[in-house]
Image (cartoon, rainbow, N blue to C red):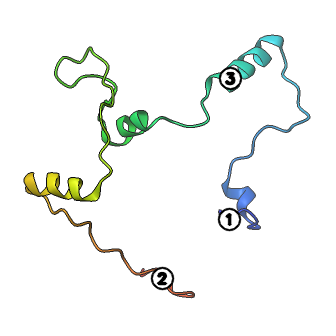
């Protein structure tokens, strides 16, 4: 139903205003233009973390005033495994699940 070419998609997905319709007033057009400029194309990872996990990565958790900044990124697997083992966490990622075979449905 939500697939791009589904026949019933128009019933489930809200449609935008018609393209030929003009705003009633100049103020309405100005608001629409401003809203289009303000919306970013992507949401930053810090905002996503705040939205999903309620973690504010832009402010210090101790004082709440200072802005946090990235000072290091660890990409070397042996270093990551050593840090996780030191913290008492499993350094190995969980096994990947099997992919569904064609025609296999979800369990209901």
- Mark 3 / mark 1, whichever is N-terminal: 1
Task: Please say if 15 is above or below 32.
Answer: below
Residue wearing tag 3: 37
Image quarter where the C terminus lies is bottom left
Q: Residue 105 in the image: x percent, y percent? A: 50, 83
> Is residue 29 found left or right of 13 in the rendered image?
right
Which of the two residues, 68 or 31, is positioned nearer the viewer here? 68
Label 1: state its secondary structure. Answer: loop
Is the residue marked by circle 1 packed among few (<14), some (14-19), or many (20+) residues within 10 Å? few
Rendered image quadrant of residue 107: bottom left
> Is residue 64 found left or right of 108 in the rendered image?
left
Label 2: state its secondary structure. Answer: loop
**Mark 2 or 1: the one toward you:** 2
Q: Which mark is residue 101?
A: none
- Residue at far right of view: 20
Is the residue marked by circle 2 packed among few (<14), some (14-19), or many (20+) residues within 10 Å? few
CA gap, disc 2 to disc 1? Answer: 19 Å
Rendered image quadrant of residue 4: bottom right
Task: Please say if 4 is above or below 47.
Answer: below
Residue wearing tag 1: 3
Q: Residue 84 in the image: x percent, y percent? A: 16, 54
Q: Residue 78 in the image: x percent, y percent? A: 23, 59
Residue wearing tag 2: 100
> Is residue 64 found left or right of 25 in the rendered image?
left
Label 3: state its secondary structure. Answer: helix
């Amino acid at each position: 139903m939500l697939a791009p070419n589904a026949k019933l998609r128009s019933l489930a997905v809200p449609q935008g205003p018609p393209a030929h319709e003009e705003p009633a007033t100049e103020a309405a057009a100005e608001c629409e233009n401003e809203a289009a400029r303000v919306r970013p194309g992507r949401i930053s990872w810090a905002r996503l973390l705040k939205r999903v996990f309620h973690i504010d990565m832009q402010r210090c958790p101790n004082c709440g005033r200072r802005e946090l900044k990235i000072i290091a990124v660890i990409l070397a697997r042996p270093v990551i495994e050593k840090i996780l083992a030191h913290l008492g966490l499993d350094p190995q990622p969980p096994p990947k699940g099997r992919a569904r075979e064609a025609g296999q449905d979800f369990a209901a």
